[in-house]
Amino acid sequence: MRTLLCAVFCAALLLGAARAQVVAPELLKPENRTISSSKQFTVFGGTRQQRSDLVRRAEQLREKLNAELNLSGSYRAPILLTLTPQDGLRLRQPRLFAQVFDAGEAGRKLQLDISPSVLSDSQAIDDAILRSLLLEIAVRKQKFSRNRFVEPPGWLVAAMSADLSDRDPGEEARIFTALLETKSMPKLERFLRQDPASLRGRARDIHEAQSLALYRCLLELPDGKGEVVENLALTEPAQDPVERFAQTWPALSADADRLARIWALGIARLASPSRVEILSADETASGLARALRSLDLPSPGEEAVAKLAADSKSEQGRFQLEKAAVDLRNLGLRAHPLYAALVGEYAVLLDNLSRGKRRGLESKFTESEDLRGALDARSAEITDFLNWYQANAAEQQPVVIAKKPKDISATRNDSLSRYLDSVEQRGW
């Protein structure tokens, strides 16, 4: 086998380009690796439980993707998942980092480096594995030009992430509710050229939802899935995403009005308000408290402020703050109106701390905590009053207006009527 050539292309899945992480020799030992049942995935490093969980999840996503796109179970390039040791990370190494290596006649391989700090983020892991699977399909037929290749369309990667990942109801509500916030249809050219990895927060949510809507609209066309797979696995895909879209759907690219109509219909279907269920006040308060408890804050006061400030100065602390901010943004989409504004305040505060912005931390956090305590007390009072009213309020009987009976004696003169009249007169 020829010696592996240098990496022909490096793509950071979340945080941008960086130098490749060198795999430590001890990670390559047989006792430090786990191979999946399909043999497409090999996981290096970490504990046996971590490797087992990662292999199992990768196989589940692989089966889902094959079923969604009607793909066969065969593959051409193996995917290596490397759990990098904490002390082996470079200063600017992304948490998730993908590379493609070309070994000439020996074939190609994909490598995904995963830092320990991202293992707790199941959604990020799912996104990275799905992107690697789509990347493996995209490079099967491509001929590398000047050691470069064309990645799978960003909108398709985002659509698969939204469609195949196991999301709880709150996460689904976040995607569908994001569509409700779009005031107009995006321009196709601008949308196709967007890089999902460069988007954050609400912009990423909206792009993901729009991608899912576009994907489902394309499926409704004749041979919809076949055309999606054809575009993904083009032998010579165009570098420009707009031109690549036109290679498979030239009629839609030429008729922008028609595409806008069917795309708008798809967005309207996904944005159905019935998919979004508003939480009760108690459920919202519990979700807010749960997100704050994940930060392991001491009792409210100066100690909690000091803990937040210290966390914003460490890498692990900033990660926890960012995760809590994401949880609160998701909660805010379904929050009870009584708590909606407060949840948003906490989300902004924690998001700023995850970026190292600590200006006004003490006053903002103290005000938010005071307001949270007051809302919890008021919510409890309202709940108690409603319970008392339901248990003690007198049921109001419907008012029935009696109608004067008709005098049928004048209209009926048969023997039975005369008999009943006589009984009534005698008082029997």
Image (cartoon, grey):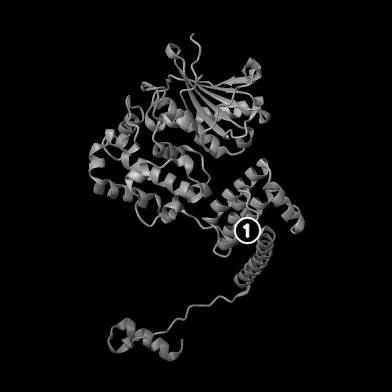
Query: Which residue is drawn at the image coordinates 39% and 35% (left, top)?
Result: 153
Looking at the image, the residue that sits furthest to the front is 146
Out of 243 and 345, give the one closest to the viewer: 243
Out of 392 and 276, give the one closest to the viewer: 276
- Could you tell me residue 210's position as x and y percent? 39, 46
Out of 355 and 170, give the one closest to the viewer: 355
Taking 410 as reference, is 116 above or below it? above
The answer to which image quadrant residue 389 occupies is bottom right
Q: Amino acid at mark 1?
A: Ala
Looking at the image, the residue that sits furthest to the bottom is 425
Query: Which residue is drawn at the image coordinates 27% and 39% (left, top)?
Result: 221
Taking 187 as reference, is 99 above or below it? above
Query: Which residue is drawn at the image coordinates 46% and 89% (left, top)?
Result: 427
Q: Is 217 on the left-hand or right-hand side of 363? A: left
| Count of all numbered marks drawn on residues in the image | 1
Out of 389 and 157, give the one closest to the viewer: 157
Q: Is 8 on the left-hand or right-hand side of 21? A: left
- Could you tell me residue 362's position as x and y percent? 70, 59
Query: Which residue is drawn at the image coordinates 51% and 49% (left, top)?
Result: 201
Give the residue pinned by disc 1.
285
Tell me the element at label 1: helix
- Could you tell me residue 271's position as x and y percent? 40, 52
